[in-house]
């Protein structure tokens, strides 16, 4: 099963996390803008979720290039195409940096 997250509004994102739902903020180099990034639970690699890399506003007029997965169930995930695994905890935002 593949699910798709909706684009993040340019004014920022509101997360509805808690209990067993967390989020992943994946910081990426600018050359990934507008690319899709996929993640999948380690125990169910066919259950992929994807989102688009966007430029997100930060305080002070700065911007971050990132992919935001706003609702992931607690567990371990693989970032597809990269040798990176992340742990998602309910009620928390996990941040990871992709350097390639």
Image (cartoon, rainbow, N blue to C red):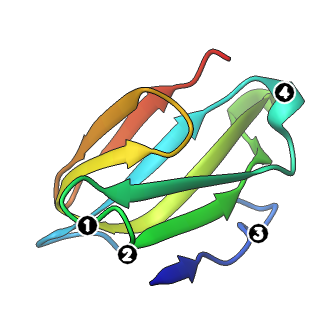
Task: Tell me what residue is drawn at x 36 percent, y 44 percent.
Answer: 78
The residue singled out by tag 2 in the image is 16
The residue singled out by tag 1 in the image is 44
**Above or below — where is 10 with respect to 17?**
above
Which of the two labelled residues, at mark 4 and mark 2, occupies the earlier sequence position? 2
The residue singled out by tag 4 in the image is 30
Of the 4 image quadrants, the one containing the C terminus is top right
Q: Is mark 1 on a helix, strand or loop?
A: loop
Distance from disc 3 to disc 2, alpha carbons, whole Å, reads: 15 Å
CA neighbours of label 2 inside 10 A, class few (<14), some (14 to 19), many (20+) = few
Q: Where is residue 92 in the image (x, y as percent from the top left)?
A: 25, 51
Mark whose residue sits in front, 2 or 1: 1
Mark whose residue sits in front, 4 or 2: 4
Q: Is mark 2 on a helix, strand or loop?
A: loop
Mark whose residue sits in front, 1 or 4: 1
Distance from disc 3 to disc 1, alpha carbons, whole Å, reads: 30 Å
Q: Position of residue 69 (x, y in %)?
A: 50, 60
CA neighbours of label 3 inside 10 A, class few (<14), some (14 to 19), many (20+) = few
- Residue 12's disc is none
Task: Tell me what residue is drawn at x 67 percent, y 29 percent.
Answer: 28
The residue singled out by tag 3 in the image is 9
Nearest the viewer among 27 and 40 is: 40
Which of the two labelled residues, at mark 1 and mark 4, occupies the earlier sequence position? 4
Which of the two labelled residues, at mark 3 and mark 4, occupies the earlier sequence position? 3
Using the rendered image of the protein, determine whether residue 13 is visible from the camera's viewpoint.
no
Q: Position of residue 30 (x, y in %)?
A: 84, 27
Q: Are marks 3 and 4 in contact (CB under 8 Å)?
A: no
**Above or below — where is 13 with respect to 65?**
below
Of the 4 image quadrants, the one containing the N terminus is bottom left
Which of the two labelled residues, at mark 3 and mark 1, occupies the earlier sequence position? 3
């Amino acid at each position: 099963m593949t699910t798709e997250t909706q684009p993040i509004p340019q004014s920022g994102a509101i997360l509805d996390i808690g209990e067993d739902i967390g989020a992943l903020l994946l910081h990426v180099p600018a050359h990934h803008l507008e690319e899709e990034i996929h993640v999948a639970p380690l125990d169910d690699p066919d259950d992929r979720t994807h989102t688009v890399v966007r430029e997100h506003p930060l305080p002070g007029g700065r911007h971050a290039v990132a992919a935001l997965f706003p609702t992931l169930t607690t567990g371990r995930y693989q970032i597809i195409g990269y040798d990176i695994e992340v742990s998602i905890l309910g009620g928390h935002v996990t941040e990871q940096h992709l350097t390639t």
